[in-house]
Amino acid sequence: MSLREKFRQQKRELLKKHKHVIENRETYGYSSIINKDKLPKGIGIWSCGEGKHIIDIIPYEVGKINPHRNEGEIWHYLELWVHRSVGPRKEHFVCPSANSKIRKPCPICEYQDKMRREGKLSSDEIKELYPKRRVIYLIWCHDNEKEEKKGIQVWEVAHWFMQDRLDELAEAPRGGGLIHYFDPDKGKSISFKRKGTGQGNTAFTAHSFLDREEVIPDKILEQTFPLEDVVKIPSYDEIAEAFFGKEGEETSETEEEEIEEPSIDEKKENEEDIPDEIVGKEEKGECPYGHKFGEDADEYEDCLECDKWDDCFSYKEGK
């Protein structure tokens, strides 16, 4: 049975699940985290550069570790919690504790919990140790003929930059139901812009749906594979060695040795994430994160927790 036929067979349940995800998106609870050696021949990892892009998100058959879907179902993204920029090599690790289909001990989470209980780290330092929400897609890029000819590519990105925006966009106006943009027959292409490429100045904007000129061809659907199968699942020791270093590391909270406090990098996120800390000036009329006051309201992840959001948004709206 082809993937298109399986999609149609599961379509009723799939659309119900899409609706559930949209309605409950606030409660759903990467070096790359993709093992390139496990990618099917001819499949690459998409690099989202600065500028405008047009992509299709392609559904696939779910593998074993998807926290929100069962193996064999058809879905269109893999959402994982990831510890980013760990240690001096700035490595990224899928958190074995935070992801429900893995549920194994994590040395970083153990360290965080111990430091929080003992009051040895500030609230900002504790916050830095939380895993970050990431999403992986199979995409077909339409930026140019060269990109189109590549066929399916794998894309990993912060949930905030893409899936969060798509969930909002998928809610059709005036009670029009949901837009199932990932449907290979009746879905939509996605247009968006990336602004900036460095730490703290990257934003994804102008998300919109475009009518497709044709259905997703079988030659593209036939390239799909379970994203879960190509994700690196690290061992406890791998994470501990990266986080604590080879000498004096804590291998488990069950041991009684004192944990040596690691240095806390104030810039945990890489170019696709915005740091959580407030930096820059705090005078009225200036963005405490260094963005454009009155212009960039709701454009960055920082806006979620900014104390000056009301003034900034009101200024933007001309109130």
Image (tube, helix red, strand yellow):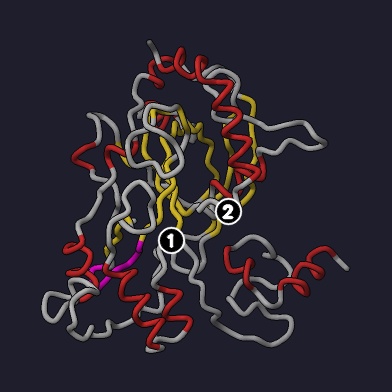
* 224 part of magenta stretch: no
Horizontal arrangement in the rendering, residue 224 relative to residue 37 (left or right): right
Q: Residue at x 54, y 36 (%)?
A: 54
Horizontal arrangement in the rendering, residue 1 relative to residue 20 (left or right): left
Magenta region: 83-89
Q: Position of residue 237 (x, y in %)?
A: 16, 64
Q: Earlier in the sequence, mark 2 or mark 1?
A: 2
Marks 2, 1: nearer the viewer:
2
* Up/down of 106 relative to 255, above or below: above
Q: Which residue is mark 2?
A: 27
Q: Residue at x 51, y 77 (%)?
A: 277
Decide which of 156, 123 is in the foreground and name it: 123
State the residue lying farthest toward the right.
319
Amino acid type, label 2: Thr
Amino acid type, label 1: Lys
Q: Position of residue 209 (x, y in %)?
A: 64, 35
* Disc sitting over residue 237 in the figure: none
* Up/down of 309 relative to 57, above or below: below
Q: Which residue is mark 1?
A: 132
Considering the image in quadrants, where does the C terminus appear? bottom right
Q: Residue at x 32, y 67 (%)?
A: 85
Q: Quadrant of residue 294?
A: bottom right
Circle 1 Cα neighbour tier, 10 Å, few/some/many (<14 / 14–19 / ≥20): many
Secondary structure under tag 1 reads strand
Q: Residue at x 59, y 39 (%)?
A: 191
Decide which of 202, 159 is in the foreground and name it: 159
Horizontal arrangement in the rendering, residue 42 relative to residue 27 (left or right): left
Q: Position of residue 227 (x, y in %)?
A: 34, 37
Q: CA distance from mark 2 to mark 1?
A: 15 Å
Decide which of 100, 184 is in the foreground and name it: 100
Q: Position of residue 13 (x, y in %)?
A: 56, 25
